[in-house]
Image (tube, helix red, strand yellow):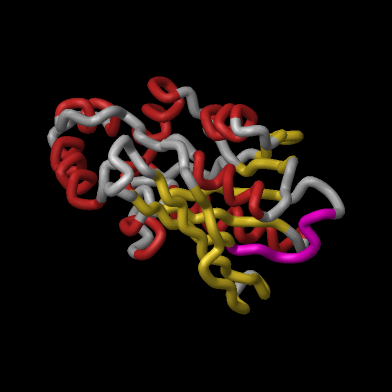
């Protein structure tokens, strides 16, 4: 979804268990067709260190309440989030972009309905399709615009998803290196990782 404007709305010190970050809030405003109907997307950027000396480590992380907050073992989201924060902290510089795109963009309640179908044997892609959704609604335009707002022309991207690499490249952000976000598989999400690899092209396993 193209944005008519992307602006920083807030910035504050943000100490964490991984080190001292800045937390920046961004809003992207889109005007789909009717100028009276404005849609606002939001995301935060956790930034650390000197981001201009070299292409910084960057992680684009989509919100996952079940994984990030409750440490669910249905997915690898929580472990990937912590992996990225640890990598950024170990280098002393980098950016974590956290988007409000629960369930790859279908929302929390739809994601829980998909969980019900997965309990009956569907994989994550089959469940989304059965509910009338695409496998993935994310387009990563807002993270790209935030990187531009931060004057970041090139990045080292922490991801297993080639679509994230392609999305940034298409938006004019050079990805000079893909850094693996692979974490050890748990029996409870081994099939989930296999589905991401076999049906969504993720570079895992």
Q: Nearer the viewer, residue 185 or 195?
A: 195
48 is within the stretch colored magenta? yes
Q: Is residue 95 visible?
A: yes
Residue at horizontal 51 percent and vertical 65 percent from the top: 25
Residue at horizontal 24 percent and vertical 52 percent from the top: 108
Residue at horizontal 74 percent and vertical 41 percent from the top: 154
145 is within the stretch colored magenta? no
Q: Position of residue 142 (x, y in %)?
A: 50, 46
Please state if 17 lies on the left or on the right of 105 as rendered: right
Name the image quarter holding residue 190.
top left
Q: Position of residue 72 (x, y in %)?
A: 33, 56
Q: Nearer the viewer, residue 43 or 20?
A: 43
Residue 104 lies, with reference to residue 72, above or below; the image says above
For the N terminus, the image quarter is top left
Residue 137 lies, with reference to residue 92, above or below; the image says above
Tell me how many marks there are: 0
Q: Residue furthest front?
A: 35
Residue 39 lies, with reference to residue 170, above or below; the image says below
Please state if 105 lies on the left or on the right of 22 as rendered: left
Q: Nearer the viewer, residue 82 or 97?
A: 97
What is the span of residues highlighted in magenta in the rendered image? 46-52
Q: Position of residue 22 (x, y in %)?
A: 63, 71
Q: Position of residue 18 (x, y in %)?
A: 63, 70
Residue at horizontal 42 percent and vertical 34 percent from the top: 193
Please state if 95 lies on the left or on the right of 115 as rendered: right
Name the image quarter holding residue 166.
top right
């Amino acid at each position: 979804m193209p944005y008519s404007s992307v602006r920083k709305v807030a910035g504050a010190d943000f100490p964490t268990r991984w080190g001292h970050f800045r937390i920046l809030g961004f809003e992207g405003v889109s005007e789909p067709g009717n100028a009276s109907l404005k849609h606002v997307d939001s995301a935060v950027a956790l930034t650390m260190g000197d981001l201009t000396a070299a292409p910084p480590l960057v992680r684009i992380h989509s919100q996952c309440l079940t994984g990030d907050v409750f440490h669910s073992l249905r997915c690898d989201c929580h472990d990937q989030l912590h992996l990225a924060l640890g990598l950024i902290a170990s280098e002393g510089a980098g950016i974590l972009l956290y988007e409000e795109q629960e369930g790859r963009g279908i929302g929390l309640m739809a994601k829980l309905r998909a969980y019900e179908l997965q309990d009956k044997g569907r994989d994550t892609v089959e469940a989304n399709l059965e509910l009338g959704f695409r496998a993935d609604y994310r387009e990563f335009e807002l993270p790209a615009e935030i990187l531009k707002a931060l004057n970041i022309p090139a990045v080292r991207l922490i991801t297993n998803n080639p679509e994230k690499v392609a999305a940034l490249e298409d938006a004019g952000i050079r990805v000079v290196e893909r850094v693996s976000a692979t974490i050890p598989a748990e029996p409870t999400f081994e099939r989930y990782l296999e589905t991401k690899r076999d049906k969504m092209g993720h570079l895992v396993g």
